[in-house]
Amino acid sequence: MKSQYILLPPLIFLASLVIQTWIVYEPTTTIRYKGLSLKKLYEESLNQYNERNSEYDSFIQRAKLKPASNSYVDAVFPKRQGLNNELISTPQRENATILMLCRNWELFQVLKSMRSLEDRFNKDYHYTWTFLNDVPFTDEFKIQTTAMASGLTEYGLIPSDNWDTPSFINQTKYDECVDDFVKREVIYGFSKSYRNMCHFNSGFFYKQELLLKYQYYFRVEPEVEYFCDFQMDPFRLMRENGKKYGFVITLLEYQDTIETLWDNVENYMNEYPDSLHENSSIEFITDTTPIGAEFLKPDYNSHYNLCHFWSNFEIADLDFFRSDEYESYFQYLSEQGGFYYERWGDAPVHSIAAALLLDKSEIHHFEDIGYSHVPFYTCPESTSLKSGKRCICPDNGENNIDLQAHSCLSRWWKFGSGKKFMRDYFHEEDYV
Ligand SMILES: Nc1nc2c(ncn2[C@@H]2O[C@H](COP(=O)(O)OP(=O)(O)O)[C@@H](O)[C@H]2O)c(=O)[nH]1
Ligand SMILES: [Mg+2]
């Protein structure tokens, strides 16, 4: 036997000892999954478990790329090419936020609205989205909406005394009123939370902490759609033209929901006669003479003609709502109890305030945005405008609310600030 073979048995013995020790003390290293040892996998999952508590934060860290659209991966405010290929500075930004009050379960519809507004407007501006809720938003809600936003997102919890039914409301009377509204099948008449929402939107949204730093807001609701490229910053338009309230659709309110609203407004005006603006658009909400071929004459028991701005879309100056005039108007109405005993909506409450307290020239009709919220839509009629702004309208205009009998748009043209023409407002950097 050669000498080297003499060493073989002790070497094999030693090697088997090493392997046994390895298996006994490091069993995990022998089993691998996707190239990771079990020990590593265990450590990874422990990390993931620990991260779960701050999943929201860690997601934000990782979500540098926005999955919503390729355009969102552009650096914030890149230099862009102008109409003649020159480099132009990006649009300036205003002190403004996009605001949505909503519920966690509306996430899918919220994302649809966000996607639409990002693509048509905000992807070029990156305004912050502010979300408000009467209960805390879930991490899932925050993660998904943050991923969809091209700018920052902020989430506010509404204090209960800004949301709940005030203590001065008589519960027995309230229950009887709700029962009566249910019997009469008044729209949302059954819902107490809807009443809280309308009361909140009338007198509390602008007092929320997250909104205090802003001057303008753009109200968005779940499941709305914008049909045209904005090609302008509506906040800038508001500031440069001294506008305080902007709308897209104006129509008649359901009279059953506001039976005594106007009487109370008149009482308020009698108590505070100075608050009526000398150049108000009071005729817009009180005139009842027919306009156009089709006109629905509202059968209402007061001087109010039921015309209001549809408040699910609003672009407005928060200082209007923060004014003493608006605050005393809201307080007066709130104390009458009609938000609960009837079902006063924030739309007529905002609209009547805007029509009475503002100069009519401070109210702006955004006629070129194109917008839908079930069951109505509006879209520009002009073909050149539609192609210039790449509008995709739902049909050829047959169902456009502006052409229906229950629209108040022609009344606004007649008694409000008149009809404006689309290219009156123009900044070249917006048209790229
Ligand atoms: N957080 C919260 N938001 C609500 C509640 N009720 C309605 N909203 C929001 O208030 C807005 C108006 O409500 P919506 O159901 O769309 O009423 P509609 O537009 O009048 O049919 C939407 O943005 C809703 O998400 C509620 O109880 N809690
Ligand atoms: Mg809605």
Image (tube, grey):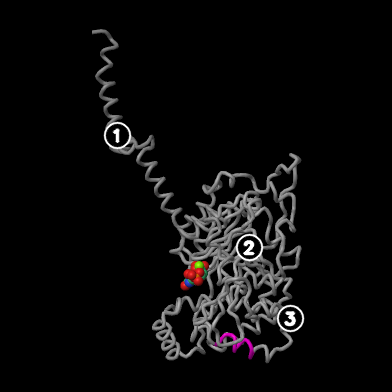
First of labels 2, 3 by sequence position:
2
Q: CA distance from mark 2 to mark 1?
A: 64 Å
Image location (x, y in percent) of residue 283: 68, 80
Q: Nearer the viewer, mark 1 or mark 3?
A: 3
Q: Nearer the viewer, residue 206 or 112?
A: 112
Q: CA distance from mark 1 to mark 3?
A: 91 Å
Q: Nearer the viewer, residue 356 or 335?
A: 356
Q: CA distance from mark 2 to mark 3?
A: 28 Å
Look at the numbered disc 3 and give the secondary structure of its residue: loop
Task: Decide whether residue 265 is among the magenta residues.
Answer: yes
Kind of residue indicated by mark 2: Thr
How many numbered marks are there? 3
Residue at image location 37% in from the left, 42% down from the top: 39
Q: Nearer the viewer, mark 2 or mark 1?
A: 2
Q: Check disc 1 and report the residue beneath it.
A: 21
Look at the numbered disc 2 and give the secondary structure of its residue: strand
Kind of residue indicated by mark 1: Thr
Q: Callout 2: 10 Å neighbours few (<14), some, many (20+)?
A: many
Above/below status of 186 relative to 219: below
Residue 133 shows in the view: no
CB under 8 Å between callouts 2 and 1?
A: no
Above/below status of 63 relative to 320: above
First of labels 1, 3 by sequence position:
1
Q: Check disc 2 and report the residue beneath it.
A: 97
Look at the numbered disc 1 and give the secondary structure of its residue: helix
First of labels 2, 1 by sequence position:
1
Q: Which residues are magenta?
A: 260-267
Quick check: is the Cβ at mark 3 less than 8 Å away from ligand 1?
no
Q: Check disc 3 and report the residue beneath it.
A: 277
Q: Horizontally, is 80 left or right of 305 in the view?
A: right
